[in-house]
Image (cartoon, rainbow, N blue to C red):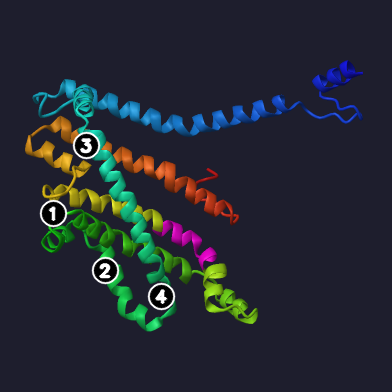
């Protein structure tokens, strides 16, 4: 009897006659589709990188300039081996990444209640709203000299520049999301007897989510750019070595290979954080509300 049951199980048929597909056979096509889908997404950018690196190498071979003035990919790779071997690049990348992410989280905690206050207090928005928009277009590098004078060569200078760069973007993103909420939502909350805090937490913030997420992504971009500007200028004192400081060191030594390497590292860290943190976060948040990012279905 047990042999018969085992034979039926292998054949995908249960004892009561109901035919079900074997679990292993059902999972394999799913994994295959996932792999093909992942490869379809990864192949175009990988091909573009290979083409660009090849063109860079060809231009380096064809250039009449000296190798130290126009280093090729091989020279930059050799520089990478040197700074990774002595530990300076991993340490600088970890320092900058921590500053960027922690500064962004602080900016998020400060900007969200400020945006809600501006959205609900009309006179405050008329007074401060234009100033917030003006701060968003001000280059972050302009804040660095003032921050150095006030805080000296300390981490406070770095975080001040990050916050001044990221907070206006997050505020404007959340305000834009709230402004696009239909007025019927507020009327419905009033009819149902929701208090203001209930309306904000249960209706307003979920409805404003697309604009809020867009503001957060822009806020992270401003955080990262502001961090690089601050690390380029604020060097020494009690400040640890960041990626921007390493870029400045390459300029001081006229080491173009190091400069090119750090530019690529800055670009790579920004892309990795975007792909591993913000893109999945945005997809999960929007999918939970029946929405999808632009281009997700392309």
Lower sequence index among marks 3 and 2: 2
The tag earlier along the polypeptide, 4 or 1, is: 4
Where residue 209 appears, as percent x and y from the top left, is: 50, 61
Residue indicated by mark 3? 262
Q: Quadrant of the N terminus?
A: top right
Cβ atoms under marks 4 and 2 closer than 8 Å: no
Classed neighbour count for the residue bearing mark 1: other residues with Cα under 10 Å, few (<14), some (14–19), many (≥20): some
Residue 175 place in picture, x, y as percent: 42, 69
Give left or right: position of 286 versus 230.
right
**Point 33% across, 27% down: residue:** 51
- Viewer-nearest of discs 3 and 2: 3
Mark 1 or mark 3, whichever is nearer to me: 1
Badge 2 marks a residue whose secondary structure is: helix
Q: What whole-number distance in Å separates the C-alpha atoms at marks 4 and 1?
A: 34 Å
As drawn, 140 above or below 54: below
Is residue 128 shown in magenta? Answer: no
From which residue to which does the magenta span run?
Answer: 205-215
Name the residue nearer the viewer: 97 or 189: 97
Q: CA distance from mark 4 to mark 2?
A: 18 Å
Distance between mark 3 and mark 2 Cα atoms: 31 Å
Residue at disc 1, secondary structure: loop
From the image, tell me which residue sits under label 4: 117
Q: Which residue carries the number 2 mark? A: 134
Q: Position of residue 69 (x, y in %)?
A: 10, 29
Q: Which residue is mark 1?
A: 153
Sooner in the amino-acid sequence: mark 4 or mark 3: 4
Q: Main secondary structure of the magenta part?
A: helix
Q: Quadrant of residue 187?
A: bottom right
In this view, the mark in front (4 or 1): 1
The residue at the point 20 percent across, 23 percent down is 78
Residue at 36%, 41% in the rendered image: 271
């Amino acid at each position: 009897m047990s042999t018969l049951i085992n034979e039926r199980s292998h054949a995908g048929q249960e004892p009561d006659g109901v035919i079900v597909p074997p679990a292993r056979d059902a999972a394999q096509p799913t994994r295959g589709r996932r792999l093909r889908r992942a490869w379809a997404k990864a192949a175009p950018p990988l091909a573009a990188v290979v083409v660009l690196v090849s063109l860079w190498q060809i231009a380096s071979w064809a250039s009449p300039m000296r190798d130290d003035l126009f280093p090729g990919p091989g020279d930059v790779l050799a520089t990478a081996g040197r700074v990774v071997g002595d530990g300076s690049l991993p340490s600088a990348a970890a320092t900058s990444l921590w500053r960027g992410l922690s500064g962004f989280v602080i900016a998020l905690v400060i900007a969200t209640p400020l945006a809600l206050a501006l959205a609900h207090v009309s006179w405050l928005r008329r007074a401060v709203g234009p100033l917030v928009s003006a701060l968003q277009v001000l280059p972050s590098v302009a804040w660095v000299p003032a921050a150095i004078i006030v805080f000296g060569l300390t981490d406070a200078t770095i975080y001040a520049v990050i916050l001044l760069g990221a907070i206006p973007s997050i505020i404007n993103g959340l305000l834009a999301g709230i402004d696009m909420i239909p007025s019927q939502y507020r009327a419905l909350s009033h009819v149902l007897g929701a208090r203001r805090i209930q309306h904000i937490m249960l209706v307003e913030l979920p409805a404003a989510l697309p604009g809020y997420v867009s503001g957060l992504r822009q806020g992270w971009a401003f955080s990262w750019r502001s961090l690089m500007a601050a690390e380029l200028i604020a060097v020494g004192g009690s400040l640890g070595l960041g990626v921007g400081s390493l870029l400045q060191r390459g300029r001081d030594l006229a080491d173009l290979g190091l400069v090119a390497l750090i530019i690529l590292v800055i670009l790579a860290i920004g892309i990795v954080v975007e792909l591993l943190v913000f893109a999945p976060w945005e997809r999960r948040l929007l999918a939970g509300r029946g929405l999808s990012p632009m281009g997700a279905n392309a």
